[in-house]
Amino acid sequence: MFIPLLVLRNAFRHKLRTALTILGIVVAIAAFGLLRTLVDAWYAGANASSSARLVTRSAVSLVFPLPLSYAQKIRQVPGITGVAWANWFGGVYVNERNFFPQFAISGAGYLDIYPEFILSEGERKAFLADRTGAIAGRKLADKFGWKVGDQIPLRGTIYPGTWTFNLRGIYDGAEPSTDTSTFFFHYDYLNETVKQRYGRAGDSTGVFVESIVHPEDAADVSQAIDATFKNSLAETLTETEKAFQLGFVAMSEAILGAIQAVSYIVIVIIMAVMANTMAMTARERYGEYATLKALGFGNGFVALLIFFESLGIALVGGLLGIALTFPVSHAFVETIGSLLSGFRVSQQTMVIQLAAAIAIGVVAAVVPAWRAARVRIVDGLRAIG
Amino acid sequence: MSAAAQPAPAAEGRQPLVAIHGLSKYYVRGDQVIPVLVDLDLDVYAGEYVALMGPSGSGKSTLLNLIAGIDKPSSGEIRVTGVDIAALSDSELALWRSMHVGFIFQFYNLMPVLTAFGNVELPLQLTTLSRAERRERVATALELVGLTDRATHLPNELSGGQQQRVAIARALITDPTLIVADEPTGDLDRVTAQEILGLLARLNDELGKTIIMVTHDPKAAETAHRLIHLEKGVLVG
Ligand SMILES: Nc1ncnc2c1ncn2[C@@H]1O[C@H](COP(=O)(O)OP(=O)(O)OP(=O)(O)O)[C@@H](O)[C@H]1O
Ligand SMILES: [Mg+2]
């Protein structure tokens, strides 16, 4: 009981200094947690996606559409149980800040391939029966307070004009990780309108999605699809949905890398700050450490006093920082209005935060503890008076 | 006074508590050698009260530190309580000090975060005594120095004289063989210094403690039984 008492009293000798150190650690650990959670959320979409589905896109680039006629040929490839297509719409709801993904999809075929989007039988029927109907994910609908029956106007950016949809259903996710922030409407409506209104060619789409019998055949089936369109005007690139999503993530790899680097830099900075504080604290107490040693306490005892004090301060800061990560992440999502699916503080993040706090405490104590243990008693005593 | 240059009390056949022979201490600065203590011989017997005087820089503290086992000689023999302390390792020496030496410093050197009670109890944390036994011993020591009513006070709530009395209680608590005091009254006014010196004299008289005290003050030196003069690292007179 003696060492904890001494450590505790020592830690509170300079209340302001200790409080500021703890504050610094709290901020650093919370910032670290927020940045990691942000990166996690980015990958979460990819991880939630299936490797039992394939995505076919233009081999040149995602922005080049594929002819709709490909659907027939893809369907004939062995191992495929369903083909559907989706086209990015890119509309704006009220203002640009309200970003969410919108796809024009091939109705029932598409929904059948995505069983994790759970829609009541009635709403599914109502959606399929209404040419200008649409469905929205629960998270999206909650965010804007939409109810079934509402009219949703979207201002097209790729397809100009205002498009108004009837919200016919709100789907839930089968898993907590299922993304429910997307807006779907009928490809046919988009296609026909584009042809009539703008005289564009139409009959093309951004991607095809295919469900396959055996996920382990994904590579073979993908190759077979791409082989079908080899040497055609629009060659294809097929990969699993997961690989496709990770490709998306890869585009932002540089940004993610930077965020991750910053998160670790924050830890290193607070480590340096705390090491400086502990060095200062220990230096002020050399006389006391020398006295303790003269009385017969060992070098290790003195080093432990510094270690425990440093570790204690770092742990208090770390735990407060972890606790703070939750409200901060929540506020962050609220502020940027993002619908990033899976934006929640993972257990892994908390474990890493805790480990970082311990590392801060230990690293900060190493040099001061080593010095205090090594200082000669007579030199330490000379520091008094 | 007449105590000056008095030889060690008749001690034929008795082993000295402190036996120093040919002791030297020097510091090396680059290629310069700074001698502090030169070929020194000294015996101190159990029960003695020795005052060590001399000009500033003459090596008084250095000698006291060597006897107390917190510094190592450059050469020569130093046996204290029959142990060749120069040969002990750091941890052996720490254990030896905790059992045999009580320290009193000029600036008291109390732990500012511990109460008077906690400070006196400090050396007992290294023993296997139970909480109750420690409590009892501390109470006795605090009573001896007249600070029973200040047990719960922190050092910064005590006067200099009171702090030094706490330090004396701390030096006594393990019932050490030898008490070393480096200018114990150096930071106190005359009246308070007199109180402290009276206390030290009682420790020597009533409890039979061997005391070696460094002092600048001739009045303080008078209270000792024997006076040793150090000048430029050599004992004189
Ligand atoms: N670490 C060191 N390096 C070099 N010289 C030292 C060191 N420590 C002490 N000295 C020298 O040793 C000499 C004796 O020092 P010491 O502290 O023993 O003197 P003192 O007699 O106690 O003096 P004072 O009365 O002022 O306390 C001094 O000249 C001092 O400069
Ligand atoms: Mg001195």
Image (cartoon, rainbow, N blue to C red):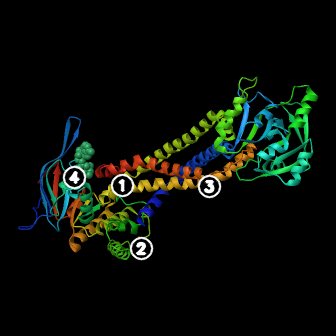
Q: Verify CB contact (< 8 Å) between mark 3 and mark 1.
A: no
Q: Quadrant of residue A86?
A: top right
Chain letter for the residue marked with disc 4 in the picture: B
What subunit carries mark 3?
A
- List the single residue furthest toward the left: B12
Look at the numbered discs 3 and 2 and tell me whether their residues touch, using CB distance below 8 Å.
no
In the image, the residue with mark 3 has its CB under 8 Å from the nearest atom of ligand 1? no
Q: Earlier in the sequence, mark 4 or mark 2?
A: 4
Q: Position of residue A6 (x, y in %)?
A: 43, 61
Residue B51: image location, x then y, percent: 20, 60
- The answer for how far apart the CA atoms under marks 3 and 1 are is 35 Å
Residue highlighted by disc 2: B149
Residue B131 image position (x, y, % from top left) = 38, 74
* Residue named by callout 1: A289
The answer to whether the beta carbon of the residue marked 4 is less than 8 Å from any atom of ligand 1 is yes
Local packing at callout 1 (Cα closer than 10 Å; few below 14, some 14-19, many 20+) is many
Residue count near mark 3 (Cα–Cα under 10 Å), binned few <14, some 14–19, many ≥20? some
For this view, does A355 lie left or right of residue A203? left
Q: Could you tell me how far apart the alpha carbons at marks 4 and 1 are, in whole angstroms?
A: 23 Å
User: Which residue is at a point 37% across and 63% down the rendered structure image?
Assistant: B163
Q: Position of residue B56 (x, y in %)?
A: 24, 48
Helix, strand or loop at label 1? It is helix
| Sequence-earlier tag: 3 or 1 | 1
Q: Which residue bears the numbered disc 4? A: B60
- Mark in front: 4 vs 3: 3
Residue B91 appears in the picture as rendered: yes
